[in-house]
Amino acid sequence: MEFKEFDSNKLMYVTNRPDLVFTEGDGMWLTDHNGKRYLDYLQGWAVNALGHAPQCIADALTEQGKKLINPSPAFFNAPSIELANLLTENSAFDRVFFANSGAEANEGAIKLARKWGKKNPATNGDARFEIITFKHSFHGRTIATMSASGKDGWDTMFAPQVPGFPKATLNDLASVEALITKHTVAVMLEPVQGEGGVIPATKEFMQGLRRLTKQANILLIVDEVQSGMGRTGELFGYQLSGIEPDIMTLGKGIGGGVPLAALLAREEIACFEAGEQGGTYNGNPLMTAVGVAVIKELLKPGFMDTVRERGAYLRQRSLEISEKYGFEGERGEGLLRALQLGRDIGPQIVEAARNMEPVGLLLNSPRPNLLRFMPSLNVTKEEIDQMFAMLEEVLAKVEK
Ligand SMILES: *Cc1c(COP(=O)(O)O)cnc(C)c1O
């Protein structure tokens, strides 16, 4: 079938897409409308924790779909209770609110922090509401989460912004301290900045932030929409630095590809009152049943060991190719990594890799001098080797 037979112009234009329609997925592989296969290092943007169309998700969807899809958020349902229990048993948090996207979970975190700030006012009685966030951070595409994000240009794009998100510099504790005022209620960050170019917060910085926020009696919020659910080699990214935050948000990997996200808080922070938070689809059993299937896979003995092992191998191979082509090394945690190209050839590589024949390679370049790798957490060693073999073929062309 020809691409032009699809009348794709009825979809609202929001981004440039190649003339491809993906029709099937299987593990690390995608197939397009012409039957061409692609090794997929995007995985729905670090979303498909278990790869494309894993059996356990297909089973969860069909079994739950036959039983109960949505009794409404006004009633309890069994999968959401089970998933909340699994998440709290395996993290530093006590209470879970389910959402449908990372941005929505972060909106919930902002609301919860502001609510807590009302209940815990400044010494002069003023409600506290400011949340310190970071330059180059990414927290979502709603107006409030865009305002919280530190992406260049986002401050003016849909102005006016939601006020109350002063920006500090990642890994610079003094820059955070300088922004704390009597209005400050929280600090919010990604343990590894994902969209910003895979920049990990250092262990010292995370520990320093925890100390600083405790001293100032303000909350520490971790946005683990990208870094959570095993992506960094720990179940949650904050565990890499041995701290316990007050609030965490999850998205992407938690649904293994379906729309599911979560807001988690410690007991004493979870202060919403009736009617203050909700949503029509929130915690519906169809999506939370998938979440249960995903986390049970991650909790299987040895699963996280393999993620760490594959992450170390991806790092080793990245360093080797960096040495060979005169790039500038690599960075990241677990299976969220970036190759630092040192020159602005990322977009060219992405395009040439996708156009390779007979099989293509899907890569992401969040900045022109970077390639970001976000394979499924169950990627094999062979699929890593194959990616680097294909990347070398592409580089031979691009560097010519
Ligand atoms: C992707 C992402 C979001 C937004 O999630 P959506 O599901 O696209 O709304 C928020 N924070 C981080 C760190 C992300 O990577």
Image (tube, grey):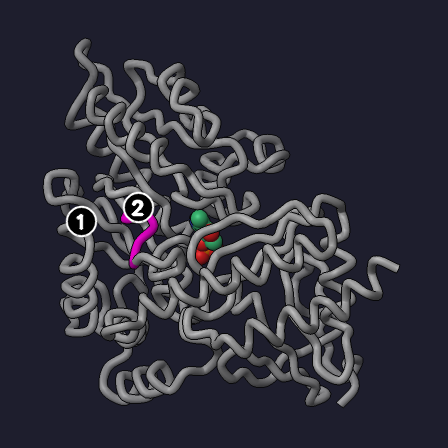
Q: Is residue 236 found inside the magenta-colored segment of the image?
A: yes
1 and 2 marks in contact (CB < 8 Å): yes
Question: Residue drawn 48% across and 27% down?
Answer: 169
Do we see residue 288 in this rendering? no
Residues rendered magenta in the picture = 235-239
Which label's residue is closer to the chain start, 1 or 2? 1
Residue 253 x %, y %: 39, 64
The number of discs equals 2
Q: Is residue 328 found inside the magenta-colored segment of the image?
A: no
Residue 136 x %, y %: 54, 36
- Residue 173 - label: none
Q: Which residue is mark 2?
A: 238
- Residue 92 - label: 1
Specify the farthest residue to the left. 268
Please name the amino acid that badge 1 sits on. Ala
Nearer to me, 297 or 158: 297
**Which class describes the residues within 10 Å of circle 2: few (<14), some (14-19), or many (20+)?**
many
Residue 193 x %, y %: 48, 44
Question: Residue drawn 30% across and 46% down?
Answer: 238
Give the main secondary structure, helix, strand or loop, of the magenta stretch. Answer: helix
Quadrant assignment for the C terminus: bottom right
Is 300 drawn above or below residue 152 in the view shown?
Answer: below
Q: Relative to 89, is 55 on the left or the right?
A: right
Question: Residue drawn 36% across and 31% down?
Answer: 205
